[in-house]
Amino acid sequence: MDRSTLLWKSTLEGLIQIGSVAENSIDRRRSLVYTALVVENLLSAFINSTLPLDLSLEALYGIGMVGKHQMEQVLQVVEEIIVVKLLKVCLEGEFVQADTLISLLQFYSGRIISWLSDAGDVSEVAMQFALHIWNQMENKNILKNIHVMGILDALMMTMKHLVSVSTINHQSVILQKSHEIILKSVSCPTEWFATEWFPTEWFATAFQNPELLMSSPSSSVEDLNLISLFASVITAVSAQTPLPPSNPNSSSNFVSNLFLFFFLRGHMPAAQALASTINKNPTDSKAIESCLSILSEDKTENKQFFKKDIITGFALIGKGLVMRGDDRSKEIIQFLLKLVISSQHGLDAALSAADGFHIIMGDSDGCLNKKFHAVIKPLYKQRLYSTLVPVLLKSMKEANSKEVVCRAFGHVISDAPLTAVIGEAHKILLAVAHSIITLSTDIQNKDVVYSLLLVLSGILMDSTGKESIIENLHIVIGVLTQLVSYPHLMLVRETAIQCITSMSTLPHSKIYPVKPQVLKAVTRALDDKRRAVRQEAVRCRQAWSRGNMHVRRYKLLGRSLKKVWTEMVYGSWAHLFIGFIRTPRVFPGKFV
Amino acid sequence: MTLGLINANPVVHERRERLSRADDPPHHPYPHPHPHSHPDDVLDALDVFDSVRDIRDPEHPYSLEQLSVLSEESITVDEKLGRIQITFTPTVQHCSMATVIGLCLRVKLMQCFPPHFKVDIKVSPGSLANEEAVNKQLNDKERVAAALENPNLRQLVDECLYSSELYSY
């Protein structure tokens, strides 16, 4: 960090400290003076863009943290700037400002709103801004351009945050407003979804005849953008919030039918919203029956079905059901397993299904998490893990495409809680080693290889896990030495060498047979093109060469120095002369 | 020949500030966009210097860097040819520790760099009385190997190299 940045940061820190003292003092005038001098000056500097964006955002957040009142002032100014920039980018076409807008949106939702919701109730403010955004969406010109350069994604995440911090009443207001706009603006006849006229069997038959699905009106860019934003609202609502329409006469299936329709067209945000609805209110919607009936029909001829987006969407729905602990999730899990093991519908479908397991077992920031009010049954991951692992272990030997099964297995193992995995280390260790070897040939698997390696290192750190590693030492060392020269990802090489270094502390009788193999591999790594890998290789080599010996503490006494000196003076024949030198002879003033 | 230390009052310099290199953040799972060569990671003199600067002097509890025996400027690295050249300056003209220091340097470089690198260790010109003889001794493979087989010498070299782990925290 250079001097001027350090100075700036220290000054900011000083101002924040002064602010918190002023805020906490009994005399209210101090706080007012601080607000007038510091906060307002910084805000006007921000509005006039005198500082670079990242520095001004950091300064605003720091000053805002002084107190709730100050943060609310910051919030107001940031809201105004966001709206101004949104209009500039979407209406006037100044796309160069898109990055600034995205940074502002992320700052607003990720930092300011989160801080305020931790500090107190921010629901009213959040609702007002959400409604303000929806008001802008009535303008077709804004809607047309909003997906450009990632603005829509940032806006969707902001909307999710705003909805998630609102109370149930405020969420209903936002839902009501968005529902009205959808009904008004989306061009495909939305009354289809609202009535019973749109039966669930329609979906099943539509998939038998793709033309039927395509003959319904095609969606424009504005439609899709609106649906995405509506989906972000639905993804983040609480389970108790009633979904529109609130009119008891019309069907309450509007939301799920709408999203099911768009999901089957491959729209990912719709799939997320559908999964969230199913997770929070499964009894209300007939959407699950529709999905499962689609799955149960035999789809061997319909290639349309096995596209990546559809399979990923089904994985999301499966996740929603699994998190809830619903037994109907079994059908979706079976469907994915069948795709992975038999891979009769092509390698792409099998790979998408394998990645589906990553979605189900993993954690996501975008939907189906605690922040967005998902219904989560405790230990759902452990239950799913114990169901899936025996099946995958068995099919690793029998499957057509072993790489796909290994990929699915890798996802399940690396996303499962580490304690569950370590408890069964003796059962899965060989499978983990085999998967790493199988997957390390293809560059596409590099993230799975890294995750599996981290699991292996977790097993190594644990005392019971160490026992199983010692039993299978040759195989584990074989895998690790192969990974030392893994070309696709530096982190894999570095972590492999770190694992080997920690294995040098295992019982000497077990590790000495593999020492030559290890030293050979690590010596090759000394030549690696990345510095971090080279440094780890040096440490590893030292650990394995010196063994378990600790450095003995020596003091350099005059005696040992004498021995060294004689060595230097008399060369390698000194040992012949040592006896001669030590016998007490009289030399003129030299030896005592 | 004296019994006592060769240089009882060495001049000790300050340790230079260690520059930390800007690396890719280690937790980032996706590599640099050009995975084949990261230009900042090419082996350079600072790498070599970082590996040898903490070697302790045989006589005093200071590092070679602190006693100005070594500096970054005295190291030349040619990665393509695979050569490292180090020049060090003993503190006094008649230092008989020079060969021990040279031996420590060689052992450390053997441990830290791949075996195909050729390492040349020399004393800086004019800094030692028997400069030529010492240079010859330090770069003779057989004499180095014989010295390393001597357990007393080995013990001394180990102390100089690994005591930095004990003292440097």
Image (tube, coloured by chain):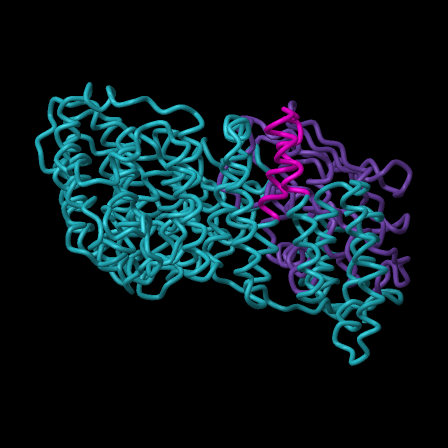
Chain colours: A cyan, B purple
Q: What is the x, y in percent for residue A159?
A: 49, 47
Query: In the picture shown, does residue A178 fall above or below B77?
Result: below
- Viewer-closest of A125 and B162: A125
Residue at (39% x, 46% y) in the render: A451
- Viewer-closest of A313 and B124: A313
Q: Is residue A396 visible?
A: no
Q: Is residue A432 left or right of residue B72?
A: left
Residue at (60% x, 40% y) in the render: B24
Query: In the picture shown, does residue A455 fall above or below A355?
Result: below
Please identify the dominant SS of the magenta region: helix
Q: Is residue B123 left or right of residue A350?
A: right
Residue at (17% x, 54% y) in the render: A387
Q: Is residue A270 visible?
A: yes
- Viewer-closest of B30 and B165: B30
Q: What is the x, y in percent for residue A319?
A: 27, 49
The quadrant of the image that shows the N terminus of chain B is bottom right
Residue at (70% x, 44% y) in the render: A54
The quadrant of the image that shows the C terminus of chain B is bottom right
Q: What is the x, y in percent for residue A56?
A: 74, 47
Magenta span covers which residues?
A81-107
